[in-house]
Image (spheres, helix red, strand yellow):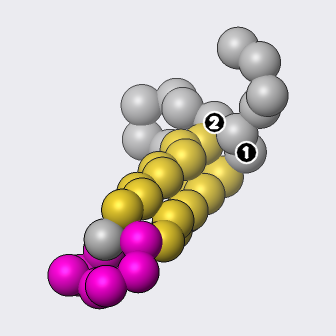
Amino acid sequence: MQNGALGIKIICKGRLAGAEIARKEKVMEGRVPLTH
């Protein structure tokens, strides 16, 4: 990562894209340790 980060994790949940049923989407890039 550009500024020295090891990784990134993004979680979005709810009625994504106006769907009737809610769901959760997760994207991880690089290493995301369990603790910091």
Q: Nearer the viewer, residue 22 or 32?
A: 22
Circle 1/circle 2 CB separation < 8 Å: yes
Q: Give the quadrant of residue 14.
A: bottom left
The residue shown at (53%, 44%) is 8
Question: Is 20 placed left or right of 33 in the picture?
Answer: left
Q: Nearer the viewer, residue 11 or 14?
A: 14
Q: Nearer the viewer, residue 8 or 23?
A: 23
Q: Which residue is mark 2?
A: 6
Residue type pointed to by label 1: Arg
Please provide percent x and percent y for residue 21.
Answer: 41, 80
Q: Secondary structure at mark 2?
A: loop
The residue shown at (23%, 81%) is 17
Q: Residues within 10 Å of mark 2 (few under 14, many from 20)?
A: few
The residue shown at (70%, 39%) is 32
Answer with mark 1 or mark 2, whichever residue precedes in sequence.
2
Q: Which residue is mark 1?
A: 31
Q: Which mark is residue 4?
A: none
Report the span colored magenta.
16-22
Residue type pointed to by label 2: Leu
- Location of residue 28 with respect to 18 vertically, above or below: above
Please provide percent x and percent y for residue 16.
Answer: 30, 74
Measure the C-alpha gap from mark 1 to mark 2: 5 Å
Q: Is residue 19 magenta?
A: yes
Q: Residue reaching furthest right? A: 34
Please provide percent x and percent y for residue 36.
Answer: 70, 14
Q: Nearer the viewer, residue 22 or 25?
A: 22
